[in-house]
Image (tube, helix red, strand yellow):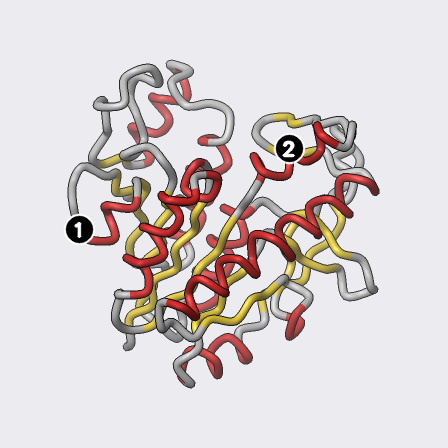
Amino acid sequence: MDKLRIIKIGGNVIENQSALSSFLMDFSLLNGYNLLVHGGGKEASQLANQLNIPVNIIDGRRITDHATLDLITMVYGGKINKSIIAQLQYLGCNALGFTGADGNSIVASKRPVKPIDFGFVGDITQVNTDIIKILLQAGVTPVFCAITHDGSGQLLNTNADTVASSLAQALASDFEVELLYCFEKKGVLEKVEDDESVLLKINSLLYQQLLKEQKIHSGMLPKLKNCFDALSKGVSKVFIGNADMLKGQLPFTQIEI
């Protein structure tokens, strides 16, 4: 079975142009099949503040009203996605940008309004892999942003970590999938204030202990949930760390069942 890396980038890797350029250089040099998923929440929040659009985030997830949906469509699907595509083309990586609506690749349903009304936020219900597999086998690298659709003409904001995990799960029957969550930190930290306190391995038992001790919070909560979901659905390996893990440089965190 062919190997496929699905790499999600977020945080300061996207905000810092030199960090993004460095990451994309390393990404373009990877052999085999690769797929990239990106967020862009910080840039969206900065633009929202400039436009006086309120930013509301609960448990690491953004409340998405009409104005916010328009904004993230512009930022995620437009500015960030196309800038990444242009840089990858320059680096010799033939990339193609996607939302979940493109090729009907990721279908989601609008999240119920209770207990929290997140607005136009989608929970993924279906991933259609046919077009993704055709592109990969043709030497094209798909680059997904964190936007899905409901099949009835409505775009939806969907957590980028969840997009990456769902793609990994759907493609695990056709590839040996490795899922890598890449951000500015070296991995999952035991102490948030200590960048060197990287946990090299986290299994479900340690995860429950960290939750109990409230050492895992904010955006790391949905990220780790997505890691364990992926492993339970056939994804072979899951890692969290900075761009150096693309080159196999420790430290980074491996998630295990």
Could you tell me the amino acid type at mark 2?
Ser
Q: Is residue 78 left or right of residue 80?
A: right
Quarter of the image holding residue 68?
top right
Quarter of the image holding residue 57?
top right
Front residue of 207 and 31:
31
Residue at 23%, 22% in the rendered image: 197
Report x, y in % for residue 221.
48, 31
How packed mark 2 is, by other alpha carbons closer than 10 Å (few <14, some 14-19, many 20 or more), is: many
Report x, y in % for residue 204.
33, 35
Front residue of 253 and 32:
32
Q: Is residue 109 above or below residue 173?
A: above
Task: Name the quarter where the N terminus is drawn.
Answer: bottom left
Front residue of 240 and 30:
30
Could you tell me the amino acid type at mark 1?
Gly
Residue at 50%, 64% in the rendered image: 85
Q: Which residue was labeled with disc 1?
A: 248
Report x, y in % for residue 224.
42, 37
Q: Which residue was labeled with disc 2?
A: 45
How far is the residue under mark 1 from the one under mark 2?
32 Å
Secondary structure under tag 2 reads helix
Q: Is residue 83 left or right of residue 116?
A: left
Residue at 77%, 32% in the rendered image: 51
